[in-house]
Image (cartoon, rainbow, N blue to C red):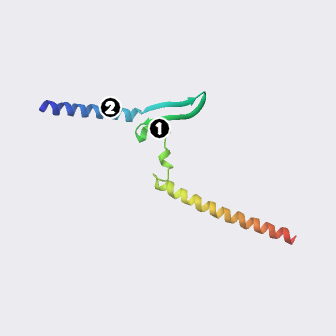
Amino acid sequence: MAEQRMEHSLQAAGLADILERVLDKGIVIAGDISISLVEVDLLNIRLRLVVASVDRAMAMGINWWQADPHLNAQARELQEENRMLRERLDKLEHALATTSQEIAHVG
């Protein structure tokens, strides 16, 4: 019985070491799937999977989660600020166009 527990413990340690290495170095899995019929492409799928720690991903230039408003509160705030600025700009452009038309009618 003790031998089985020892094996599980060693397996867990081995798995932890492997996981640590993968996260530290990163691993990329890539593949393309193409389905065609009579030389007509019906479906193309490009698969790209990167498994790495956050630090390693950022070192590779991968940081999409920082700009995703669903994952980052600051990105949500920026998205809302951008929306408000667009609305404000639209109002200013509309007011400028109205003023220009009024000046054209007077002149």
Which amino acid type is shown beneath numbered disc 1?
A: Ala
For marks 2 and 1, give the CA distance: 20 Å
Q: Residue furthest bottom?
A: 106
Q: Which residue position is annotated with label 1?
A: 59
Q: Position of residue 47 (x, y in %)?
A: 49, 35
Name which residue lies at 51% across and 58% down.
77
Q: Secondary structure at mark 1?
A: helix
Name which residue lies at 86% across and 72% down.
106
Residue 90 placement: quadrant:
bottom right
Q: Position of residue 28 (x, y in %)?
A: 45, 32
Q: Mark 1 Cα within 10 Å, few/some/many (few <14, many 20+)?
A: few
Q: Mark 2 Cα within 10 Å, few/some/many (few <14, many 20+)?
A: few
Q: Secondary structure at mark 2?
A: helix
87, 35: nearer the viewer: 35
Q: Position of residue 4 (x, y in %)?
A: 16, 31
Nearer-N-terminus badge (2/1)? 2
Q: Which residue position is annotated with label 2?
A: 18
Q: Residue furthest right?
A: 107
Say if 37 sits above or below 92 in the image.
above
Q: Is residue 2 left or right of residue 13?
A: left
Q: The N terminus is located in which quarter?
A: top left
**Mark 2 near mark 1, Cβ–Cβ under 8 Å?**
no
Residue 41 placement: quadrant:
top right
Which amino acid type is shown beneath numbered disc 2?
A: Ile
Q: The C terminus is located in which quarter?
A: bottom right
Say if 71 sits above or below 9 in the image.
below
Q: Is residue 92 left or right of residue 101?
A: left
Q: Is residue 106 left or right of residue 89?
A: right
Q: Position of residue 60 (x, y in %)?
A: 48, 36
